[in-house]
Image (cartoon, grey):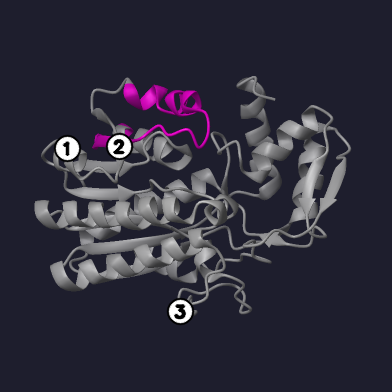
Amino acid sequence: MSSRVLVTGAAGFIASYLSERLLKKGIAVVGVDSFDDFYDPAIKEQNLAQARDHEGFSLVRGDIRDRELLEGLPDGIDSIVHIAARAGVRPSIAQPRLYYDVNVMGTLNLMELARKREIRKFVFASSSSVYGNNRSVPFSEEDRVDNPISPYAATKKAAELLAHSYTHLYGITCLCLRFFTVYGPRQRPDLAIHKFSKLMSRGEEIPMFGDGSSERDYTYIDDILQGLEASLGWVHEHEGVHEILNLGESRTVALREMISVIGEELGIEPRIRRLPEQPGDVDRTFADISKARNILGYDPQWDFREGIRTFLEWLEAQDRI
């Protein structure tokens, strides 16, 4: 297992939890985060509160596009978990150049860092968005993903291809993880579950794009973290391999059901404002996780309603509703 991990996007939702879990296992973490204003940087500061107090944690404030910053990172890093990204389908349509710059060029910078420092273990956070409107369900890693329907999805696919080339050329073991709609405490405030929960609690309308039949494979944060930890172990057990795995719950929840469950758990009747479907949004996501089960022993446990209940308890405790 690793002794010192570079975690990018360390102040974000997923990476802050991963940093805490690694530190508890005695693994030193170098965290990089730009604290950009995509959402309130104060939330990111709070996400890092526990990790920052640990003696094994080093925080580097900066952008993965800054090659000089990356070259100046501490010595002794033996693996990279790259989670930093400009996230979101809809904003990528408005800012495609920014998304390409961060998600593709930023990833290339980290691959180059790995090459130069001979870091042979690389875990990359990809996305279920690469599947586009795949008609074959559940989505398998063997499915063709040549038809992204948003710039965000295209950047994630491009980064997977970069990882493959660096495995082939330099023997870096790269494991690309396609996350399926992660939710739970610390979820980004712009994402639907977080946003809808706040709106409902204030008695405001929920913007529902389309007829509510679109489906997502919502994956609870603890299950994603289980997969990430197993992935870090896996890359240390394999040499010169490139692999792609789905991490999801392998269950789908329709948009209208998601809204209904949040309303029921809050004891509120949702007020819905129907809007046209949004460009770039896929009809459904649904993970085939048989490969991750086989390779990692990945075994997601969380029921959707239980996850929503836990998220709402956290949100209330944060006094953000």
Find residue 220 and report its horizontal and vertical position in percent: 57, 47
Crowd tier of the residue under label 2, counting other residues whose Cα lies within 10 Å: few below 14, some 14–19, many 20 or above? many
Find residue 30 and report its horizontal and vertical position in percent: 24, 36
Magenta-span inclusion, residue 28:
yes
The answer to whether residue 297 is seen in the rendering is no
Q: Are marks 2 and 1 in contact (CB under 8 Å)?
A: yes
Q: Which residue is mark 2?
A: 32
Q: Which residues are magenta?
A: 24-52
Q: Residue at x 46, y 65 (%)?
A: 154
Q: Is residue 249 above or below residue 36?
A: below
Q: Are marks 3 and 1 in contact (CB under 8 Å)?
A: no
Q: Is residue 44 above or below residue 303?
A: above
Q: Residue at x 65, y 38 (%)?
A: 194
Q: Are marks 3 and 2 in contact (CB under 8 Å)?
A: no
Q: Secondary structure at mark 3?
A: loop
Q: Which residue is mark 1?
A: 73
Direction from residue 272 to residue 230 in the image, left or right: left
Q: Which residue is mark 3?
A: 142
Q: Earlier in the sequence, mark 3 or mark 1?
A: 1
Q: Amino acid at mark 2?
A: Val
Direction from residue 11 to residue 61 in the image, left or right: left
Q: Quarter of the image holding residue 60? A: top left
Q: Amino acid at mark 3?
A: Glu
Q: Earlier in the sequence, mark 3 or mark 2?
A: 2
The answer to whether residue 83 is seen in the rendering is yes
Q: Secondary structure at mark 1?
A: loop
